[in-house]
Image: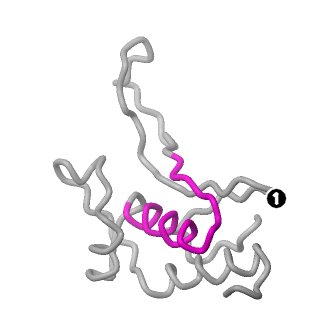
C-alpha cells in the first residue's frame, strides 16, 4: 500500500472493512456504548456502527492515516435533558482529517466515499 495515494489507501481500507465485516446491531447492556476491540470484530466478522468505526479507525491509523470515531445523535430523544451531562449518541462514523477531510459511515455499504 506504500505506493498508493492517500485517497486510494482510504478507499481500499474502507472497502476491505465493508467486504469482510457484516453490520449487525447488538446493543444490549455495555455493548450499547462500548465498542468491541478491533481484533474481536475481525474474528467475529460482524459488528455494529461503533465496532466497525473503531476497526476502520485502527486500520487507517495502521496505514499512517489519522482517523477518529465521531459519535452522532441522529434521532430526536425527547427524554434527554440538555442541561445534564451525559453520553447521548445513536450512531458512530469515522472522521479522517486532512485535505480533503472525509466523513465515513462504515455501516453504509452502498454509499460512495466522498459524498
Counting from the top left corner in percent of width and height, residue 54 is at 43, 61
Q: Nearer the viewer, residue 5 or 84?
A: 5
Q: Nearer the viewer, residue 104 or 2?
A: 2
Q: Is residue 91 magenta?
A: no
Residue found at x 16% / y 48% = 29
Counting from the top left corner in percent of width and height, residue 49 is at 42, 61
Residue 26 figure quarter: bottom left
Q: Quadrant of the N terminus?
A: bottom right
Q: Nearer the viewer, residue 20 or 115?
A: 20
Residue range in magenta is 51-70
> As drawn, is 19 to the left or to the right of 90?
right
Is the stretch drawn in magenta largely helix, strand or loop? Answer: helix
Residue 21 figure quarter: bottom left
Question: To which residue does mark 1 refer?
Answer: 100
Determine whether the residue tagged by mark 1 lies in a helix, strand or loop.
Answer: loop
Total of numbered circles in the picture?
A: 1
Report the residue that reaches farthest toward the right.
99
Image height check: is 110 above or below 32? below
Residue found at x 51% / y 72% = 59
Residue found at x 76% / y 66% = 114
Residue found at x 74% / y 81% = 8
Counting from the top left corner in percent of width and height, residue 69 is at 51, 52
Report the residue that reaches farthest toward the left.
29
Report the residue that reaches farthest toward the top.
83
Amino acid at each position: 500500500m506504500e505506493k498508493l495515494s492517500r485517497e486510494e489507501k482510504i478507499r481500499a481500507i474502507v472497502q476491505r472493512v465493508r467486504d469482510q465485516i457484516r453490520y449487525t446491531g447488538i446493543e444490549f447492556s455495555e455493548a450499547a456504548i462500548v465498542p468491541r476491540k478491533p481484533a474481536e470484530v475481525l474474528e467475529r466478522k460482524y459488528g455494529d456502527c461503533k465496532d466497525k468505526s473503531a476497526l476502520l479507525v485502527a486500520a487507517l491509523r495502521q496505514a499512517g492515516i489519522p482517523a477518529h470515531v465521531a459519535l452522532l445523535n441522529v434521532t430526536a430523544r425527547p427524554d434527554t435533558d440538555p442541561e445534564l451531562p451525559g453520553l447521548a449518541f445513536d450512531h458512530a462514523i469515522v472522521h479522517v482529517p486532512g485535505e480533503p477531510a472525509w466523513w465515513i459511515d462504515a455501516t453504509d455499504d452502498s454509499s460512495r466515499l466522498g459524498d
